[in-house]
Image (tube, grey):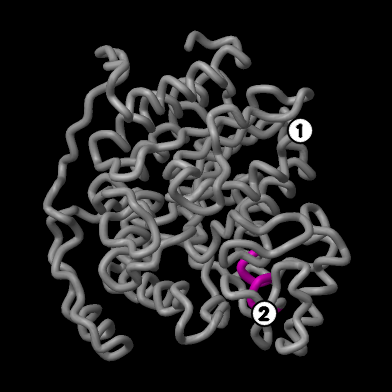
């Protein structure tokens, strides 16, 4: 394995743009790369631009008729076929949509290929993590499901066990659906409870098809869950599952929309807790995966100045084995860039002031009357016995 990780980046990913009133502002990607450069992390990683995913790759997950509908909407946005989820409020059609979406997918597929080949132990595509897209339709700001495509490519290359861990505030429904009946893929999603948030899926009882029972694991967190509960839930579920599954590659999705400032959801997680989970995923890759093979993706996140760039810059630093200290003062050059691009004032440090984050381990006992513990218990009781694990 190469000693340096890969950072997948092409400036053209910022053309994935649903328009000025849409919450998924591509400035979040530009600002993240700007902060990565301000910290010199682009010199610690091999920065690589992969080719866009071609039709044969897209067909690993997506139906041919859907790919054709995306191409048609990309060429003529006003004529988008809404039966495919295109041209809707969530997923407005825009010129060049196919090309921008295929480019983002190509970065995640390229990351997976490089990690599988051994070119690098870790690869990051923070433009990726578009986990809601379905085989035959767009959904939740996602056109092509780059996470599913990366996993499908790993399986095509010969991987027999791939683990996918999704900590976006929204359920990773598209990835779960893509591998619902495939025991080679373990999907684990921690998300706000479907009673209170899109896409209204991700119940603990969703555990996979009969041929792959226990291959889908869902932790549905109560609205308002903060740092301690979020970390407690992660550590009560993820490490034990991965230790049992022993994946050959770990793919993780790090949507930053769990943050208390995010405008589209209701968890209360800090940047510092997000960093702690990123570190935990990194440690699990080294501990449990041969060669430490880890593909880390971005995802949601709509506090595009205060949260997303800092969170994903931490992710890049961790993958580069050069983590950014939480108390670090953010370079003034980046704060100037933020003001020039957005006319907003940038945060001053790489922390929300909660580092290090304390949490209580599951092995210390649980409270059956506590809502967070009830959520963890529901997951363990539904999924763990199907994998031969004690609930």
Q: How many marks?
A: 2
Residues marked 2 and 1 touching at CB (< 8 Å): no
Q: Is residue 5 left or right of residue 305?
A: right
Q: Is residue 12 visible?
A: no
Q: Is residue 351 left or right of residue 114?
A: left
- Camera-side residue of 293 and 307: 307
What range is drawn magenta here? 99-105
Please state the horizontal and vertical placement of residue 21, each as a whole percent of the image. Answer: 45, 83
Q: CA distance from mark 2 to mark 1?
A: 30 Å
Dot 2: element: helix
Q: Is residue 384 left or right of residue 362?
A: right
Q: Is residue 68 left or right of residue 130?
A: right
Numbered circle sitting on residue 289 = none
Give the answer, above or below, for where 304 lies relative to 221: below
Numbered circle sitting on residue 97 = 2
- Camera-side residue of 387 and 248: 387
Residue at the spot x=29%, y=16% of the render? 366
Residue lying furthest right: 65
Picture quadrant of residue 185: top right
Dot 1: element: loop
Give the answer, above or below, for where 309 lies relative to 321: below
- Does the segment drawn in magenta span residue 289? no
Q: Is residue 317 visible?
A: yes
Please state the horizontal and vertical placement of residue 358, each as a whole percent of the image. Answer: 17, 33
Residue at the spot x=35%, y=71% of the render? 304
Classify 10 Å Cα crowding around label 2: few (below 14), some (14-19), many (20 and above). Answer: many
Please state the horizontal and vertical placement of residue 91, each as a whole percent of the image. Answer: 61, 72
Residue at the spot x=62%, y=15% of the render? 386
Q: Main secondary structure of the magenta part?
A: helix
Residue at the spot x=29%, y=45% of the render? 224
- Camera-side residue of 374 and 290: 374
Q: In the rendered image, which residue does mark 1 sit on? A: 181
């Amino acid at each position: 394995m190469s000693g340096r990780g890969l950072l997948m980046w092409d400036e053209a990913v910022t053309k994935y743009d649903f328009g000025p009133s849409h919450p998924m502002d591509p400035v979040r990607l530009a600002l993240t790369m700007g902060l990565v450069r301000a910290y010199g992390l682009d010199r610690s990683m091999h920065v690589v631009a992969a080719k866009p995913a071609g039709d044969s790759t897209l067909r690993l997950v997506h139906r041919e008729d859907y790919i054709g509908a995306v191409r048609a909407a990309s060429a003529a946005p006003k004529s988008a076929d809404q039966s495919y989820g295109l041209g809707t409020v969530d997923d407005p059609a825009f010129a060049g949509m196919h090309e921008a979406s295929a480019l983002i997918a190509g970065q995640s597929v390229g990351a997976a290929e490089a990690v599988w080949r051994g070119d690098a132990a870790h690869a990051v595509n923070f433009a990726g993590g578009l986990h809601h897209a379905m085989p035959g339709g767009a959904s939740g700001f996602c056109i092509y499901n780059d996470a599913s495509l990366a996993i499908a490519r790993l399986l095509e290359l010969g991987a027999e066990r791939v683990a996918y861990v999704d900590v976006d505030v929204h359920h990773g429904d598209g990835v779960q659906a893509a591998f619902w009946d495939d025991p080679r893929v373990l999907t684990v999603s921690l998300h706000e409870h479907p009673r209170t948030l899109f896409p209204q899926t991700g119940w603990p009882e969703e555990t996979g098809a009969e041929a792959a029972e226990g291959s889908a694991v869902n932790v549905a967190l109560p609205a308002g869950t903060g740092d301690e509960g979020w970390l407690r839930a992660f550590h009560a579920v993820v490490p034990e599952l991965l230790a049992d599954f022993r994946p050959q590659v770990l793919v993780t999705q790090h949507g930053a929309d769990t943050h208390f400032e995010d405008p589209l959801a209701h968890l209360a997680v800090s940047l510092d807790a997000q960093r702690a989970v990123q570190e935990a995923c990194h440690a699990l890759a080294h501990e449990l995966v041969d060669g430490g093979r880890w593909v880390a993706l971005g995802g949601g996140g709509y506090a595009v100045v205060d949260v997303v760039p800092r969170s994903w810059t931490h992710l890049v630093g961790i993958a580069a084995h050069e983590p950014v200290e939480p108390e670090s003062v953010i370079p003034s050059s980046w704060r100037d860039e933020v003001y020039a691009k957005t006319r907003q004032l940038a945060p001053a440090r790489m922390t929300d002031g909660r580092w290090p984050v304390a949490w209580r381990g599951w092995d210390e006992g649980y409270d059956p009357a506590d809502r967070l513990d009830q959520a963890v218990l529901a997951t363990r009781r539904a999924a763990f016995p199907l994998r031969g694990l004690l609930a």
